[in-house]
Image (spheres, rainbow, N blue to C red):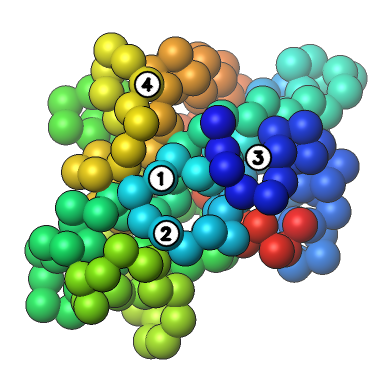
Amino acid sequence: MGNGRLTASDLTPERLQAACRRLGYAFFERGAYNLNLIAVRSSTRVANRFDDWITHTYRESEQGPLQTDVFSGTTDPGLYWLQHPGRAEGTAILAAQQVRGSHRIGLHKGYPALVQCQPMLYYRDNNRDGTLDLAGKLYRGIIGANIHRANKDKESPLVEKWSAACVVFSNPTAYAKHWDLVQKSRVLHGECFTLTILDESQL
């Protein structure tokens, strides 16, 4: 799974909740399956690794305890897109942020996924090296930064073309669990979801 300094066991509901409160972000506590969808970006800036965490914090029942599921993934573009950007300004990299209702249920390349529907902040990396550049000018817009999986049949060891600016699960079994939670949340809370991206240092 992720290779940052934080391990999966470090990402407790209490720690994620405290980070959101400290940053002035929303944290959903009421109701069953009211998902807090929080991605934690590794402090490592080497591209092409699934070294970030994608977490879901929620209650299984109205009065149940908060629990967190942690999955391996990436919040960064793969090396292919860093070296072959689709735009002269460079490849987009989402900044750390929270955007309420940023994503809604839709399709990514023909299969169910959460698709970006609200503007988000992002950088552009245009020097074509293997280091993720998270500094400089911030842009804001809808850029197709979806939440989806990599290979549908097996875990993917490298990001490569799986992400150009998206949040991507490396394991299809983890993605299936994610999608089951999305469907349970959809019934109770609607089709829009809030994505929070935290830098590891913010925890």
Between residues 44 and 110, which one lies in front from this camera angle?
44
Nearer the camera: disc 2 or disc 4: 2
Between residues 31 and 84, which one lies in front from this camera angle?
84
In the rendered view, tell whether residue 49 sits above or below residue 58: below
Q: Are marks 2 and 3 in contact (CB under 8 Å)?
A: no
Mark seen at residue 46: 2
- Ranked by sequence position, the earlier of labels 1 and 4 is 1
**Quarter of image, res 198:** bottom right
Q: Residues within 10 Å of mark 2 (few under 14, many from 20)?
A: some
Screen quadrant of the N terminus: top right
Amino acid type of the residue that numbered disc 4 sits on in the rendered structure: Glu
- Ranked by sequence position, the earlier of labels 2 and 3 is 3
Q: Residues within 10 Å of mark 4 (few under 14, many from 20)?
A: some
Mark seen at residue 49: 1
Secondary structure beneath dot 1 equals loop
Q: Are marks 1 and 2 in contact (CB under 8 Å)?
A: yes
Q: Residues within 10 Å of mark 3 (few under 14, many from 20)?
A: many
Secondary structure beneath dot 2 equals loop
